[in-house]
Amino acid sequence: MRVFVLLFNARTANEGIHSIREGDRNKILLFESEDDATRFALLLEAQDFPTPTPEAMDSEEVKAFCEKAGYDWEIVPENNAVVMPPERNLEETDWEAEETAKSDTPADTEFSDKDLEQIRRKLEGLL
């Protein structure tokens, strides 16, 4: 069955799926209707969340992902009563924590200005 999930940074290396924290568990919402997923995304945006993108996926693939990641899942039936996002959002998302860790890590190689200028010239020579 085709369902819609909400993705942040869709189709990028930093893609993430929207989940709701319930106690110590995460739950992913599987919307039967793209319109319902879009409405929920707009509600998240109104709460100053980054704008998620509704993406169609096979429900069995999402359920397999949830089992592997230790997440719960819930199907939101089409035209169901409006599902409201939680009033409180995470202070820092998983992907933001990863980006912070990457930026705190010094680069493996550092080049001097002279080295960078030589590299730039070589690259321009390729044009």
Image (tube, rainbow, N blue to C red):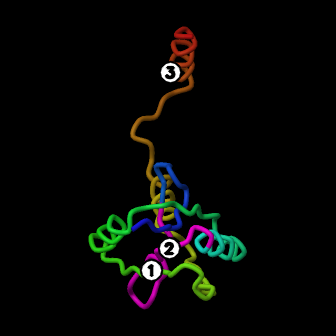
Q: Quadrant of residue 37?
A: bottom right
Residue 32: mark in rendering? 2
Whether pointer 2 and pointer 3 mark residues with C-beta atoms closer than 8 Å, the reply is no
Q: Point out the residue furthest to the right here.
A: 46
Q: Nearer the viewer, residue 38 or 14?
A: 38
Instruction: Report x, y in % for residue 78.
Output: 55, 78
Q: Quadrant of residue 47?
A: bottom right
Prevailing secondary structure of the magenta residues = strand
Whether pointer 1 and pointer 2 mark residues with C-beta atoms closer than 8 Å, the reply is yes
Question: Which amino acid, mark 1?
Answer: Ile
- The local secondary structure at tag 1 comes to strand
Residue 33: mark in rendering? none
Please report the residue visible at 57 percent of the width from the left and 76 percent of the height from the top: 91
Residue 115: mark in rendering? 3
Instruction: Report x, y in % for residue 112.
Output: 52, 27
Instruction: Report x, y in % for residue 116.
Output: 53, 23
How far apart in space, not on screen, are marks 2 and 3 (Cα)?
55 Å
Above or below: residue 4 compared with residue 9: below
How far apart in space, not on screen, are marks 1 and 2 (Cα)?
7 Å
Q: Nearer the viewer, residue 125 or 7?
A: 7
For marks 2 and 3 on the same chain, the one whose residue lies earlier in the sequence: 2
For marks 1 and 3 on the same chain, the one whose residue lies earlier in the sequence: 1
Please report the residue visible at 50 percent of the width from the left and 57 percent of the height from the top: 99
How many labels sit on residues? 3
For residue 108: magenta? no
- The local secondary structure at tag 3 comes to helix
For residue 21: magenta? yes
Please report the residue visible at 68 percent of the width from the left and 71 percent of the height from the top: 42
Residue 75: mark in rendering? 1
Quarter containing the N terminus: bottom left
Question: Which amino acid, mark 3?
Answer: Asp
State which region is magenta: 16-35
